[in-house]
Amino acid sequence: MKRTATITRKTKETDIKISLELESEKESKIKTSIPFLSHMLELFARHGKIFLDCDISGDIDVDLHHTIEDSGIVLGTAFKEALQDKKGINRYGSILLPMDESLVQVAIDLSGRPHFKYDIGNVSGKIGNFDVEHCRHFFESFTYQLQLNLHIKLLYGEDKHHIIEAIFKGVARALAQAVEIKGDRIPSTKEIL
C-alpha cells in the first residue's frame, strides 16, 4: 500500500501545494521562489527516500518568513496524512550526520505529542537571501503539524550552508527510519500514536 498525501494551503500570504509519497525513488519536482529552500527540499526528499512534488509561492517581496513557515506547515500535514494511524511504523529515528566540518545530531519520535528542541548555538546570518533562523521556523512548523518529537543539535560546525544542509539531511534520514514499516502493530502500549 502506497502512503501518499496531497495538501494545499492558500492564504493572503502564500499559495502552497505539496504532494508526497513515502518510500519512493521517483525524482522529486520542487518549484519554489526561494532557491536555497528548493535546494534543501530536493536533498530532504532524496535523503528521506520520498517523492515530493512542491509548488510553493508567497510574498517573498515582504519577507521569506511566511513562505518558509507555511511550507513547513504543509509538509508536516502531508506527512501526517500519509502516515494515517502509524500502524507498523518503526516510530523512532536518529542519526549523527557529518557535512564536511559540521556535525549534527537528530532524534525523532513519531509519538503524536509534539515537542521541538533546536540547539545550534549562535549560528546566524544569511545564505543568499535565506536567513539561518528560517530553518528553525520551518522545522518548528513541521513538528507541530506532524505532531512529532524532534530534537536537533549542532555539535560543531563553521560554515552556515553546511550546518543547515546537515540539519535537513539529518532530519530526512532520521524520519526515513521512523516511518519505515517494521510490523503490523501500532508501536505503543497505548495502542495509539
Image (tube, rainbow, N blue to C red):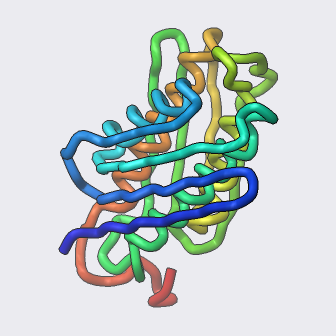
Q: In which quarter of the image is residue 144?
A: bottom right
Quadrant in which the N terminus appears: bottom left
Q: Could you tell me which residue is drawn at 81 percent across and 22 percent down?
A: 122
- Choose between 169 and 138: the one closer to the eye: 138
Give the vertical position of 112 relative to 40 (above or below).
below
The image shows residue 150 at horizontal and vertical percentages of 60, 53
Q: Residue furthest bottom?
A: 191
Give left or right: position of 5 versus 153: left
Q: Could you tell me which residue is drawn at 59 percent across and 50 percent down?
A: 71
Q: Could you tell me which residue is drawn at 62 percent across and 15 percent down?
A: 157
Q: Is residue 64 visible?
A: yes
Give the vertical position of 149 relative to 139 (above or below).
below
Q: Give the total number of marks visible in the rendering.
A: 0
Give the vertical position of 25 relative to 9 (above or below).
above
The image shows residue 145 at horizontal and vertical percentages of 62, 65
The image shows residue 65 at horizontal and vertical percentages of 75, 40
